[in-house]
Image: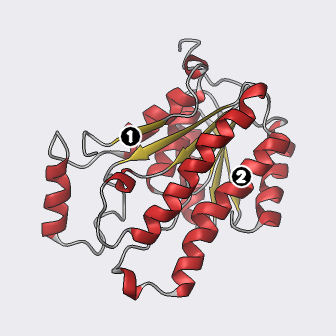
């Protein structure tokens, strides 16, 4: 493994890593040599399966339950990480809820949940990274290419993603003196376990046609970019929003 891609002896925390893109990111970081904390809110069996797969491939991981919208739970998870591995080098803000429906139908509870997880959860992670992340560390936040598409039904979801994109952009300057990079990765439509749920064939065909390649992305394609940003080769890359979407937007 080249020095630029090796994450040996580093520790990464991936929020929302029991399924989908987060699961792929956790596996890719572990394959690059990192110890990985697989965060999940209430998916212990799925998270344990991710850890089992990582360990079977020769990697190191532990599953830790925490609701990232609750500061005390998030901080307890970080302290568990430090107790387990002694240092924290990479934060991947991946966990999110995606409530997409006509704007008049969104309830206040759904609005609050969206901002609690997608924005306040990232806020907690960034503040804890400020306190505990090692100098020279890496922060990657997962946003969405839908922020550039003006899709009906995505108003609240995209509002949360726009908020964290701006948070990242500004915090890249604040973390800069410690040589911590802060970047955003914005996937396009990605073939996860649940992506097709509740979507019509017409919608899926339209989304696939928007890509230059006429297909959905794969979680490992997103994970590859995150792994690059987590490594030494990306030390001069910060404040960027990289759209990994097959040319959709």
Q: Position of residue 196 (x, y in %)?
A: 28, 66
Q: Is residue 205 visible?
A: yes
Seen at 64% across and 42% down, the residue is 170
User: Quadrant where the C terminus lies?
Assistant: top left
Which residue is at the front of the view, 87 or 51? 87
Which residue is at the front of the view, 123 or 39? 123
42 sits left or right of 244 in the view: right
Q: Which mark is residue 125?
A: 2
Question: Which SS class for mark 2?
Answer: helix
Q: Which mark is residue 154?
A: none
Check the image and report above or below for 205 versus 137: below
89 sits left or right of 119 in the view: right
Seen at 83% across and 58% down, the residue is 76
Q: Position of residue 158 (x, y in %)?
A: 44, 62
Seen at 38% across and 80% down, the residue is 103
10 Å crowding of disc 1: few (<14), some (14-19), many (20+): many
Check the image and report above or below for 146 versus 244: below
Which residue is at the front of the view, 87 or 135? 135
Q: Is residue 89 visible?
A: no
Q: Position of residue 108 (x, y in %)?
A: 54, 86
Q: Earlier in the sequence, mark 2 or mark 1?
A: 2
Q: Position of residue 186 (x, y in %)?
A: 43, 46
232 sits left or right of 209 in the view: right
| Farthest top residue in view | 2
Check the image and report above or below for 147 versus 2: below
Label 1 belongs to which residue?
243
Cα gap from disc 2 to disc 1, whole angstroms: 22 Å
């Amino acid at each position: 493994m080249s020095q630029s891609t090796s994450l040996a002896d580093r520790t990464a925390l991936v929020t929302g890593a029991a399924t989908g893109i987060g699961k792929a990111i956790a596996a890719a970081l572990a394959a690059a040599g990192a110890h990985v904390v697989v965060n999940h809110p209430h998916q212990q069996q799925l998270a344990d399966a991710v850890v089992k797969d990582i360990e079977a491939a020769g990697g190191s991981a532990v599953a830790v339950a925490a609701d990232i919208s609750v500061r005390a739970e998030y901080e307890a998870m970080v302290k568990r990480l430090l107790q387990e591995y002694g240092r924290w080098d990479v934060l991947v803000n991946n966990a999110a809820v995606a409530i997409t429906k006509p704007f008049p139908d969104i309830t206040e509870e759904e609005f609050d949940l969206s901002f609690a997880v997608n924005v306040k959860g990232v806020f907690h992670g960034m503040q804890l990274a400020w306190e505990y992340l090692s100098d020279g560390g890496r922060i990657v936040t997962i946003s969405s290419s839908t922020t550039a598409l003006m899709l009906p039904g995505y108003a609240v979801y995209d509002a949360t993603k726009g908020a964290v994109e701006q948070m990242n952009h500004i915090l890249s300057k604040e973390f800069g003196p410690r040589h911590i990079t802060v970047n955003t990765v914005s996937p396009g439509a990605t073939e996860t376990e649940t992506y097709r749920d509740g979507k019509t064939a017409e919608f899926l065909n339209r989304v696939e046609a928007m890509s230059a390649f006429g297909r959905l992305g794969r979680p490992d394609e997103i994970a590859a970019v995150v792994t690059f940003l987590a490594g030494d080769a990306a030390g001069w890359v910060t404040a960027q929003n990289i759209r990994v979407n097959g040319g959709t937007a």
